[in-house]
Image (cartoon, grey):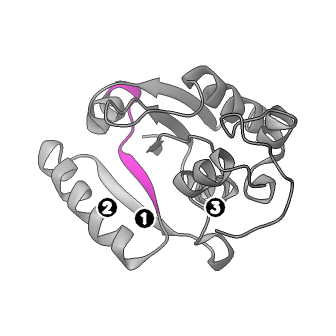
Amino acid sequence: MQRIGLFPGTFDPITIGHQDIINRSLPLFDKLFIGIGRNANKTAMFSEEQRLGWIREIYKENPKVEAIIYDGLTIKACQQVGARFILRGIRYVSDFEYEKAIADMNRSLDTNIETIFLTCLPQYTSVASTLVRDVLRNGGDVMQFLPEVVQRSLNGQNLSGGKPVTPHRRTY
């Protein structure tokens, strides 16, 4: 039986923190689906197609990785792709408490699907898509937090809603 995992998220945008979790998880799985979940409660900064394209470009040389877009429950997406594992990245203790509650709910919905938590490396604890989007909207430079594919795609775009983008390195 193949070990198939699903790494769900919005990946808006995918960051080097996401990439680190994905890359370190690959020895655990025969196949890893990166699932871009549609979240009705969030307004995305980047289109689903853009996010899907970034992930596919980053992992185009790795046949173990496939990116998908899904609606509804993550557990249903797992069932559709045959995933028996959900991968989640943890930055802080508060992340674990939140993610454990979701993992418990998922386990009650399907006892055959297990959640696996990977802690992020210390240098990535402050890298979050929400913070990256906030810095982008306010004209800050987030290139150090993004994979090269995303950097190239965003280079020269004004994402600050008309405010001049001043290049500078800043941690949020």
Helix, strand or loop at disc 1? strand
Q: In this view, does 92 lie above or below 40?
A: below
Image quadrant in which you'd find residue 141: bottom right
Query: Along the line of sight, which residue is nearer the eye, 142 or 8?
Result: 142
Residue at the extreme top: 49
Residue highlighted by disc 2: 99
Percent coordinates x, y for residue 67 in the rendering: 58, 30
Q: How crowded is the residue under tag 1: few (<14 C-alpha within 10 Å), some, or many (20+)?
A: some
Question: 65 left or right of 146?
Answer: left
The answer to if 161 sits in the magenta stretch is no
Query: Along the line of sight, which residue is nearer the eye, 132 or 38?
Result: 132
The answer to if 81 sits in the magenta stretch is yes
Residue at the extreme left: 108
* Residue beneath the point at 28% across and 47% down: 113
> Is disc 3 in contact with disc 1, using a CB cutoff of under 8 Å?
no
Q: How crowded is the residue under tag 2: few (<14 C-alpha within 10 Å), some, or many (20+)?
A: some
- Answer with mark 2 or mark 3, whichever residue precedes in sequence: 3
* Numbered disc in front, either 1 or 2: 2
* Residue beneath the point at 63% across and 79% down: 122
> Is disc 1 in contact with disc 2, using a CB cutoff of under 8 Å?
yes
Q: How crowded is the residue under tag 3: few (<14 C-alpha within 10 Å), some, or many (20+)?
A: few
Percent coordinates x, y for residue 7 in the rendering: 48, 45
Residue type for callout 2:
Glu
Residue highlighted by disc 1: 117
Residue highlighted by disc 3: 24
